[in-house]
Image: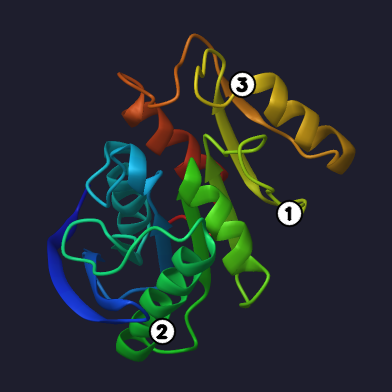
Amino acid sequence: MSARAVERLVIAGPAGGLEVAVNLPAGEPTGLALVAHPHPLQGGSLDNKVAQTLAKTFAAIGYAAVRFNFRGVGKSEGRFDEGAGETEDALAALAFARERFGDALPLALAGFSFGSYVQTRVAARVAFERLVLVGAAVGRFEVADVPPETIVIHGEEDDVVALADVLAWARPQALPVVVFPGCGHFFHGRLVQLQQVITALYPRQR
């Protein structure tokens, strides 16, 4: 993947400092991607391999990808807030991205596990191009319905969020779900395939 180096910095957030990482594309960004990591109290951080894969995938298709540590993780200040405060963290990271790269670029919201739940909350408050939800934490949190073009990817053998729960959530929405056979929650050994699938499905690939 051709992309420039990752930048890391701390910006002002709603609970104090907010640590962010920016994956820049090789050329001028054609879009923005906001990437949210898994549960802060279960080891989730912006360095999570799936979160990194999401950021690298979007950088490879020309987007500036911004990850951030939820409050209480890494250099981000504050304490876990059950998703409400974490939504504000995400919005602060997005405001930083918009200020840096401009308001006109299309926005992708991508999340893994708990991060997918937060992104559905963010989606209710901002204009965006598409949602990408990996290992969506349905059944564990009140994940809202999503637009029909949302990309949902789940492992068949996910032992954190059962595939059956995801299908039960998706079924009333007639929402397609991409299932990785023989794959667990963290997509071990399948990250390259995850990148390939998202790139193939995302409408603005370069």
Disc 1 versus disc 3: nearer the observer? 3
* Residue type indicated by callout 3: Ala
Q: Between residues 32 and 88, which one lies in front from this camera angle?
A: 88
Residue 206 position in % (x across, y down): 41, 57
Q: CA distance from mark 3 to mark 2?
A: 34 Å
Residue 5 showing in the rendered view: yes
- Residue in the picture at 14% in, 73% down: 9
Circle 2 residue: 95
Question: Which callout, 3 or 2, points at the residue further toward the start of the chain?
Answer: 2
Query: As shown in the figure, which amino acid type bears the numbered disc 1?
Result: Val
In primary-sequence order, the first of circles 1 and 3 is 1
Nearest the eye: 191 or 196:
191
Mark 3 falls on what kind of element? Answer: loop
* Residue 3 to residue 9: above or below: above
Q: Nearer the viewer, mark 3 or mark 2?
A: 3
The residue drawn where x is 57% and y is 38% is: 137
Q: Which mark is residue 19?
A: none
| Mark 1 lies on residue | 146
The spot of residue 184 in percent (x, y) is 44, 18
Q: Is residue 31 visible?
A: no
CA gap, disc 1 and disc 3: 19 Å
Q: Are marks 2 and 1 in contact (CB under 8 Å)?
A: no
Tell which of 191 and 80 is nearer to you.
Answer: 80
Q: Of marks 2 and 1, which one's residue comes earlier in the chain?
A: 2
Q: Amino acid at mark 2?
A: Ala
